[in-house]
Image (cartoon, grey):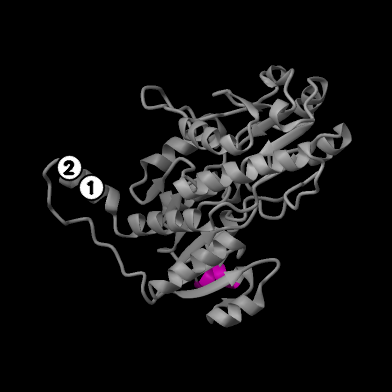
Amino acid sequence: METGKTKIAFYDACSYDKESFSEQNKNFLFSIDFFDFHLTEKTALTAAGYDVVCTFVNDTLNKAVIATLKKCGVKMIALRCAGFNNVDLDSAREAGIKIARVPSYSPHSVAEHALAILLALTRKIPQAYLRTRSGNFMLSGLTGRDLNGLTAGVIGTGKIGKVMAECLAGIGMNIIMYDAYPDNEWADQKGFKYIPLIELFQKSDVITLHCPLTDDTKHLINENSLAMMKNDAVIINTGRGALIDSHALVKALKKRTIGGAALDVYEEESRYFFADWSADVIKDDMLSRLLSFPNVIITGHQAFLTTNALKAIADTTLQNIKDFTEKRESKNTLV
């Protein structure tokens, strides 16, 4: 397969995707067709005639979709993201379709966004902004609290979790952590401490999630873990939505047994995120309820969205495709 003749069907393409990939593709010269719709069981036949499909976090890559891609002649699935919980790897393996991902693009982009929404939540920046825009400069109801001296519990210490831990330490927070595969050497160098998960839930004033979504971590934040937390603890999630049981979180927020939440992801986000629903009705009751709480901030899966990260994502994704077309082994290959 020659690079210049490789045809790529690019799904769920936003304006920033088209700009970044078109710019970086000048170095690769692939033929890319950008589609603004998701890859699903209903749209999978649009992959006919393409060698590669390029997908994102909310595209469907289950057994049925992969079977259709196989019939369409697709030879590779290029994920332009780190997570792959939406991919049936066994079906891809059986179909002989290669899959590669972008394991790291800019850990600082995600960690800095997590820090930003944490600060916005604890200092009530959205409420203050809306007030001053209308000429209201009253401060009543805007009292926040210092994060300096409080305890931050970091769950997951991969590249993003490590950057986040260092950011929080930089503003004077005490760092405790949990990871199934702890990096004790790094922790010792930084003066951070790994502790059991239950203890982290009990001691943290801020809990920030940076672990992958697996069978073991799904609904890691649930009714039981929420009950262990301090009544004024806040939860930050820039990982995957299903790390949190949304029903349990809403229940805790209503009972005021949790201090608040700042979320860049949501368990059932695929229908709503990356789309404009401002003139329509959001029928997801949990999402609507979360949006109504004054102590909840939701952003639309934008933590990755920096110029640095977009360039890195495009570079790595296109290089993964080039490695495949030239039959080179890649460390980013999943199947």
12 in relation to 80, above or below: above
- Crowding around mark 1 (Cα neighbors within 10 Å: few <14, some 14 to 19, many 20+) is few
Q: Quadrant of the N terminus?
A: top right
Camera-side residue: 8 or 229? 8
Horizontal and vertical percent for residue 188? Answer: 60, 82
114 in relation to 129, above or below: below
* Residue 245 as seen in the image, left or right of residue 326: left
- Crowding around mark 2 (Cα neighbors within 10 Å: few <14, some 14 to 19, many 20+) is few
Q: Which residues are magenta?
A: 199-203
Question: Is 112 in the magenta?
Answer: no
297 in relation to 181, above or below: above
Q: Amino acid at mark 1?
A: Tyr
What residue is rendered at 65% in x and 77% in y?
184
Q: What numbered label is drawn on residue 133?
A: 2
Work out whether residue 306 can be spotted: no
Horizontal and vertical percent for residue 299? Answer: 42, 43
* Residue 246 as seen in the image, left or right of residue 127: right
Work out whether residue 170 can be spotted: yes
Q: Evaluate if marks 2 and 1 touch, with contact meaning CB atoms under 8 Å apart.
A: yes
Question: Is 201 in the magenta?
Answer: yes
Q: Secondary structure at mark 2?
A: helix
What residue is rendered at 55% in x and 60% in y?
160
Q: State the residue position of label 1.
A: 129
